[in-house]
Image (tube, coloured by chain):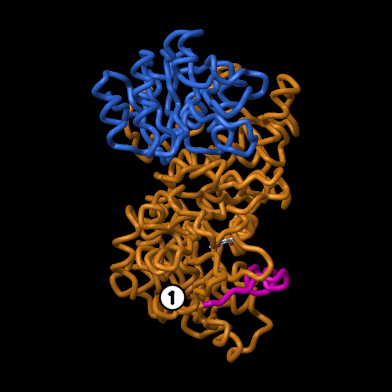
Amino acid sequence: MNDREFGFRTRAIHAGTPPDAATGARAMPIYQSAAFVFGSSEEAAELFALRSYGHIYGRISNPTVSAFEERMASLERGLGAVAFSSGLAAQLCAVLCVAQNGDHLVCAANIYGGTITQFGVTLRRMGIETTFVPGDDFDAIGDAILPNTKLLFAETIGNPSGTIGDIERLSAVAHERDVPLCIDNTFASPYLCRPIEYGADLVVHSATKFICGHGTVIGGVLIESGKFAWDSGRFPLLSDPSPGYHQLRFTETFGEYAFLIRARAEVLRDVGASLAPMDAWLLIQGLETLPVRMERHSMNALAVARWLQSRPEVQWVSYPGLPEHPHYERAQKYLRGGAGAIFAFGIAGGREAGRRFINALQLWSHLANVGDAKSLVIHPASTTHSQLSDVELQGAGVAPEMVRLSVGLEDTEDLIWDLECALRASSGQSSTGSIT
Amino acid sequence: MIVRTPSQRAALLDRSRTVTVVGASDKPLRPSYVVFSYLRTQGRFAVYPINPGVGEIDGIPAFSSLAAFAREHGAPDIVDIFRKPSEVVGIVEQAIAVHAKAVWFQYGVINEQAIQRADDAGMDVVVDRCLKVESARLNGGLAAAGLNSGLITSRRTSR
Ligand SMILES: Cc1ncc(COP(=O)(O)O)c(C=O)c1O
């Protein structure tokens, strides 16, 4: 063992995957096994009592999944990670690790819609209340934190506005009140931003997006910094005796590992939302090219955003990599190596023009996902939000003219060619486009 | 020498065979029991409890002091300490007296005077680290739990 601090690109390829100890296989094997034999009854007892590390049953851990978890922990500069079957499962379990019936969360309001319904509807039904506060109103966030608040939740890059969470200030507001900060880092990926370096205590990802990178897996992951003091008395789930584990107190027995051990041994065990080994393997593969992909995504996105700005059919472009964006400075600070792949623009002619634009595209895929090598597009007003009137749309924060892009890795010229043809079609012009 | 880097800790564990756990408890929920039990079942070290208040732990007789241990087994390689920081200067004196090669202060067991004394006596000193965690980092246990072991290698290991 040596003490070299390896760089991000090296760790994206090597962390968590030394050659297989059993066979010497250099690529990470897919351990497609539901359960693992015990060496002896004594070893089994030690494993079940959490006194030893090892694999018991695939709902709790699996060697291929562990390799993915360790790689994510390394890339996010965390103490460890727990993988889940989706991004929403990862954030649900992050909450359930610290909060129960009667507890409270504070969440930045400009956040992924799936998170708003998970917290605001499903968790509320389970007795966990969430107060949604504008993500930049730090006084209001501080005031919203109550004695029973267990978590402050926000995103690195908001969807689809491209707002950038001020992670340093959010963590200061949370830590002043002994509350941890959880950041959804899905849109940035650890290549562009590592929230733990700015004070976040927990990081969650929809691994479905850039971590996978090819639109082939639904997965999620939760990373913890190991720096938060869970034994302050605010988190009885971590510091009181656990009835599920022979009255063990996680903070006392596991010290800095308390959160991660509880997240796996109680929350993942009981919720059951574990990641499949095959999917973990695809995510391990995806991570190896994360740095080159994120650079290329950001380059293509910036080129497309600039080009759209020059078009008469386009009303506005909201990309944090453009100096006109209100959070451009913040993006420069928190996002290193580019401003990511995802942004929105307004198409002249509103809902109807948006519908024509989408129907005229040939290369961009019309679907509800982001973070694929393929370029993706969606027009909420004519799809996910089509039942709403224009007035209702405004209330939901979705402008009728808004089109969201997830810019892929294709040739920039081809992406622009397709957009140009479709923009012409949207405004009723001939759709042949220019040949570039 | 104060042991600070991962490679120094790895080398210390590599050359050590005998570990005495000072303050080992027989109560299964105490961190000292968890560490004792883990090290023992891993089989990498010969592990002995030092605690005048308990007779035995998991069938292993506890010694009342480091001196009592040394009379039977000689000098331990590592004296792993789970005691209040205010009590550890005396334990370091005992460790020096039995010619222990290293003292390991567990999480939160921080006493500058004790650290200085052990260092001056020529022992290897590890501070505010867990012996279970550091062994697990090297034998692959941490990686199996999704924890960041920090290990990057293209060599086949025996974990
Ligand atoms: C920012 C963000 N967070 C979380 C999720 C949920 O992830 P998953 O679909 O993997 O459950 C998504 C998915 O669209 C997302 O965009």
Between B48 and A174, the one nearer to me in the picture: B48
Q: Residue furthest left?
A: B120
Q: Which residue lies under the disc numbered 1? A: A142
Q: Residues within 10 Å of mark 1 (few under 14, many from 20)?
A: some
Residue at mark 1: C-beta within 8 A of ligand 1: no
Q: Is residue A374 visible?
A: no
Q: Quadrant of residue A13?
A: top left
Q: Please determine whether, in this image, residue A95 is positioned above or below residue A25.
A: below
Residue B119 on image: x %, y %? 27, 25
Q: Where's ligand 1: which quadrant?
A: bottom right
Name the kind of residue labelled 1 in the image: Gly
Between A370 and A125, the one nearer to me in the picture: A125
Q: Please determine whether, in this image, residue A280 is positioned above or below residue A376.
A: above
Q: Is residue B9 visible?
A: yes
Quarter of the image with the N terminus of chain A is top left
Left or right, A364 with reference to A13: right
Q: Which chain is blue?
A: B
Residue at horizontal 41 percent and vertical 36 percent from the top? A11
Specify whether residue A129 is painted magenta: yes
Residue at horizontal 52 percent and vertical 28 percent from the top? B136
Left or right, A104 with reference to A316: right
Residue A292 on image: x %, y %? 40, 44
Magenta region, residue range: A118-132
Q: Colour of chain A?
A: orange
Left or right, A22 with reference to A410: right
Residue at horizontal 48 percent and vertical 66 percent from the top? A154
- Element on which disc 1 rests: helix
Specify whether residue A162 is painted magenta: no
Q: Please determine whether, in this image, residue A308 is positioned above or below residue A77.
A: below
